[in-house]
Each structure stands twice: as C-alpha cells, then as structure tokens.
Image (cartoon, rainbow, N blue to C red):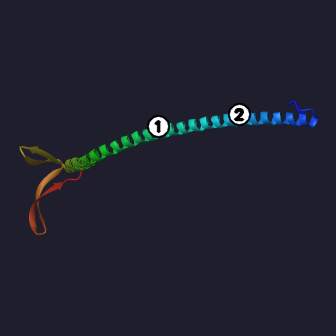
Amino acid sequence: MKTGKPTRLSEKLNAELDTIRQDYAASMASQLERFRTDLTAIASDARRTIESDTRRFLNENKSLFEMRTKQVRSWLTISPWVVSGLIVTGIASMMAASWLWTVLLTRSELTELGLIRIEQAGQTWLMLNPDSVALSRCTLAGKTNYCIKIMER
C-alpha cells in the first residue's frame, strides 16, 4: 500500500526528477514570459522612437523645403528686375565710358595738334596756336580747301 511517499529508490529518484522537471519547466516558463515582456517593451520603445524621429525629420525637412520654396519664389519675382537693372546699368556704363574715352582722346589729339577747343553758348570753337599751327589754302582732289598745317617741333 502506498502512503504518498515513494519507498523505493527508483520511485524516489523519479519523484525528485519530476519535481526538478516541474521546477525547471516553471522557471523556463517564467523566464520566457519575462523575455517576451521585455522584448515587447523594447520593440514598443523602438517603434515609438522611430516614429518620433521620423515625424521630427519630416517636419524639419518640410519647414526647410517650404523656406527654400519661399526663397525661390522671392528670387523669381525679384530676379527679372535685377537682371534688367544690371543690363541697363551695363549698357549705360558702357555708353558713359565710350563718351568719356572719346572726349579724352579728342581733346588730347586736338591739344597735340596745337588746337584748343572751346565750347560756348552751344557752339564749338577751335583756336589755333600760332607757334605750331598755321591755317592755309591747299588743293586736294582738284578742289581748293582750307587746311591746317602742323609745323614739326
């Protein structure tokens, strides 16, 4: 008759082995449950981090993209006027430089020839320097003209 306690050695060993197996199975189940819980928490945290980082990245890029778009729009409204202004300024400065260059060259040439240019009351007068220039009559191509003779120095 059995009283609940094993009497034989093999029964004792089997009972102890069953107890060890049950303890081990309970321990494994507990560890697996903790692992599952920890892994779920890690995955949830990772998902939340990825979502928040992606949201922040998209918001920052959206604002940067909107800012760049506004800059492009402002340049598109300003740039035709800037380009036109630069072209007009370039043309005007070239004309002014050409006029100034012509005046400087004309005056220096006239001075070298012994002529003095005087602009007065809307008229231009050329004065001859009697030491280096003489007004005379000459014939060119069969016609008699007034000529300015420049004497060598």
Q: Secondary structure at mark 1?
A: helix
- Residue 6 picture location, percent across and down: 89, 32
Classify residue 62 as left or right of residue 5: left
Residue at the location (65% across, 37% down)?
36
Residue at the far right: name it: 9
Residue at x 30% of width, y 43% of height: 74
Q: Residue at x 37, y 40 (%)?
A: 67
| Residue situated in front as seen by the camera: 1 or 60 | 1
The residue under label 1 is which amino acid type? Arg
Q: Nearer the viewer, residue 26 or 39?
A: 26
Please state which amino acid type lies under the numbered disc 2. Answer: Ser
**How many numbered marks, from 0 up?**
2
Q: Position of residue 126 (x, y in %)?
A: 12, 49
| 58 shown above or below 7 | below
Q: Which mark is residue 122?
A: none
- The crowding category of the residue bearing disc 2, from other C-alpha atoms within 10 Å (few below 14, some 14 to 19, many at least 20), is few
The kind of secondary structure element at disc 2 is: helix
State the CA–CA distance, disc 1 to disc 2: 39 Å
Camera-side residue: 52 or 17? 17
Q: Are marks 1 and 2 in contact (CB under 8 Å)?
A: no
Mark 1 vs 2, N-terminal side = 2
Label number found at residue 56? 1
Residue drawn 46% across and 37% down?
56
Residue 55: x %, y % from top left: 46, 39
| Numbered circle sitting on residue 30 | 2
